[in-house]
Image (tube, rainbow, N blue to C red):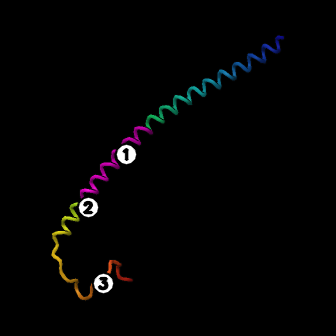
Amino acid sequence: MDQEIATLDTRLARLLELSQRLTEENVRLRAELGRLETDRERLETDRDRLRERMGEARARVEAALARLPLGTPPSDAPLTDTPPAD
């Protein structure tokens, strides 16, 4: 009976140690998750801001292109949108 109690005591100690390690890991993972969620929110905000700026830049370029005079292209200019071959 003393041997059984000693075995149970050992198993209980290992379970308590495992429980403590798992609790510490849980705390660490929750903190990491919080940091990652904050990073994600910041990146989404940055992405939205960049999309807005790109839209504004596109509008400015399109407006500038609309103000360019229409004329015939130089005789050596290609008539397609494909760049010249090297």
Percent position (x, y) of residue 58?
Answer: 26, 61
Q: Amino acid at mark 1?
A: Glu
Image quarter hosting the N terminus = top right
Front-most of residues 21 and 42: 42
Q: Residue at x 18, y 69 (%)?
A: 66
Percent position (x, y) of residue 55?
Answer: 27, 57
Q: Main secondary structure of the magenta part?
A: helix
Is residue 80 positioned above or below 62 on the image? below
Q: What separation in Å lies between label 1 and label 3 (alpha carbons)?
A: 41 Å
What residue is disc 1 on? 44
What residue is disc 2 on? 58
Percent position (x, y) of residue 71?
Answer: 18, 81
Q: Going from the N terminus, do you reach mark 2 or mark 3 first?
A: 2
What residue is disc 3 on? 78
Q: What separation in Å lies between label 2 and label 1 (alpha carbons)?
A: 21 Å
Which element type, helix, strand or loop, lies under badge 1? helix
Q: Residue at x 71, y 18 (%)?
A: 12
How dense is the environment of label 3, judged by Cα within 10 Å: few (below 14), some, or many (20 and up)? few
Q: Amino acid at mark 2?
A: Arg
Q: Residue at x 23, y 60 (%)?
A: 59
Is residue 2 positioned above or below 78 on the image? above
Say whether residue 46 is magenta.
yes
Question: In the rendered structure, are the residues bearing label 1 and label 3 in contact, judged by CB atoms less than 8 Å apart?
Answer: no
Query: In the image, which disc is placed on residue 27?
Result: none
How dense is the environment of label 2, judged by Cα within 10 Å: few (below 14), some, or many (20 and up)? few
Range shown magenta: 36-58
Q: Quadrant of residue 86?
A: bottom left
